Image (cartoon, rainbow, N blue to C red):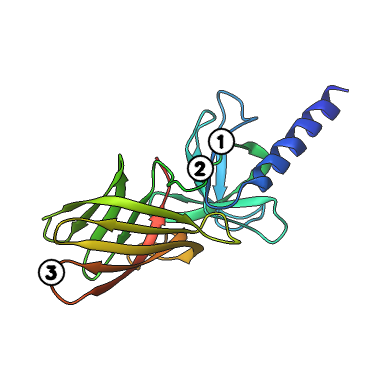
Amino acid sequence: MRAALVLAALLLAAQAAAAQTPPALFAVTGVGAGDKLNVRAAPDAKAEVVGTLAPDATGVEVVGRDAGGEWGRINIGETSGWVALSHLTAGPDPWAEGALPGGLRCFGTEPFWSIWPEDKALRYSPADGAGKVLGLTAVLEGVPRPASRALVARGKVAGITAFVSPRECSDGMSDRVFGLGIDAVLEDGGAPRLLTGCCSIAP
């Protein structure tokens, strides 16, 4: 009887995890205090272990799922791996209508740059470190993909119009895989520039 209840709880956890639109945040569940949750190189219980998660880990960003919906892809260190969704519990949906996830951070290389929300503004930091804080004037929800967002931010001499959407994305510098990509047009007094990169919602 107890085994049946445990199995039912694991199935419910997996269903709740599957209900979230990647990328989303999760917490480790059903792992003993002295144990760890294995992160594997492939969505297979026999695949090589490339890392572990603590039994009380939270804020785990799942950036994708396998075809069967039983495994979630996460980043750990400088690589990505797979964890069983039956051992993850979904947190609150970070994709509130007309808003940005609190931990959203977007970045690109060649040249290096980053963008992240800060209160009701958007901060842009270029490679030279001379950042700009721009007023966030619009956050538009994508249809039909709920994790898509269009952002419009303006300052006195600069502006950014960006589109964030769910797609597999690489930073080109590590083996990590991100679940969001960004395309942004930056206007900062010169000719407009197109920035492309990846985003994460991990805290």
The residue at the point 43 percent across, 64 percent down is: 181
Look at the picture and state if 42 lies above or below 117. below
- Can residue 178 be seen from the camera position used here? no
The residue at the point 73 percent across, 57 percent down is: 68
Could you tell me which secondary element the residue under label 2 belongs to?
loop
First in sequence: mark 1 vs mark 3: 1
Tell me the mark number nearer the camera, choosing from 3 and 2: 3
Closest to the observer, 76 or 126: 126
Q: Where is residue 161 in the image (x, y as percent from the top left)?
A: 33, 64
Q: Badge 3: few (under 14), some or many (20 or more) residues near its Cα, within 10 Å? A: few
Q: Whole-Å distance between the Cαs marked 2 and 1?
A: 8 Å
Circles 1, 3 touching at the beta carbon (< 8 Å): no
Q: Is residue 114 left or right of residue 47?
A: left
| Tag 1 residue | 91
For residue 196, which numbered disc appears in the image?
A: none
Circles 2, 1 touching at the beta carbon (< 8 Å): yes
Tell me the amino acid under the disc marked 3. Gly
Q: Where is residue 30 in the image (x, y as percent from the top left)?
A: 65, 30
Tell me the amino acid under the disc marked 2. Pro
Q: Is residue 83 left or right of residue 141?
A: right
Q: Whole-Å distance between the Cαs marked 1 and 3?
A: 41 Å
| Tag 2 residue | 94
Q: In this view, does 15 lie to the left or right of 178?
A: right
Closest to the observer, 123 or 56: 123
| Tag 3 residue | 189
Could you tell me which secondary element the residue under label 1 belongs to?
loop
Q: Can you say which quadrant of the picture contains the N terminus?
A: top right
Q: Can you say which quadrant of the picture contains the C terminus?
A: top left
Q: Badge 1: few (under 14), some or many (20 or more) residues near its Cα, within 10 Å? A: some
Q: Whole-Å distance between the Cαs marked 3 and 2?
A: 34 Å
Tell me the amino acid under the disc marked 1. Gly
Tell me the mark number nearer the camera, choosing from 2 and 1: 2
